Image: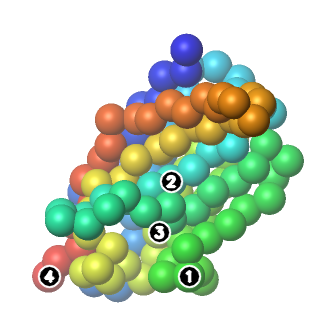
Amino acid sequence: QVQLVESGGGLVQPGGSLRLSCVASGSIFSRYAMNWYRQAPGKQRELVAGVTSGGTTNYADSVKGRFTISTDNAKNTVYLQMKSLKPEDTAVYYCNAYRYVSVWSSEAYWGQGTQVTVSS
């Protein structure tokens, strides 16, 4: 069982920055892909950024050049650095750990979410 705890959300003005943190219950980054999702009111949850167990990163087109995902293995923490924030970035942000097990199964764990509000 993997537990994920997010923090770092809050209210920020457009153009501002925030850094989200997600602490995992143990050293899992070598086995799990780590992802940040977000869900805005009335919208589906969407993948924002991810990093594979091998260190390859990927980003949604809407955040490329503005968001950066990174990991600190010593602290079992994955970060999402967000810059040049826009009102449309407002959402609840969720940390996710994912591992492909077989064609029949996979493992996925979620944090509780942290609210990010971009408003003047």
**Type of amino acid at the residue the image marks with label 4:** Ser
Pointer 2 residue: 36
In three-dimensional space, the C-alpha distance between marks 4 and 2, rounded to whole angstroms, equals: 24 Å
**Type of amino acid at the residue the image marks with label 1:** Asp
- Quarter of the image with the N terminus is top right
Q: Secondary structure at mark 2?
A: strand
Viewed as shown, does residue 110 lie left or right of 71? left
Pointer 3 residue: 82
In three-dimensional space, the C-alpha distance between marks 1 and 2, rounded to whole angstroms, equals: 14 Å
Q: Is residue 12 visible in this depiction of the protein?
A: no
Image position, residue 106 (x, y; %): 65, 31
Where residue 1 is drawn, which disc sits there?
none
Q: Residue at x 50, y 61 (%)?
A: 47
Mark 4 or mark 3, earlier in chain: 3
Q: Secondary structure at mark 4?
A: loop
In three-dimensional space, the C-alpha distance between marks 3 and 2, rounded to whole angstroms, equals: 12 Å
**Circle 3 or circle 2, nearest the eye:** 2
Pointer 4 residue: 120
Instruction: Answer above or below: position of 46 versus 4.
Output: below
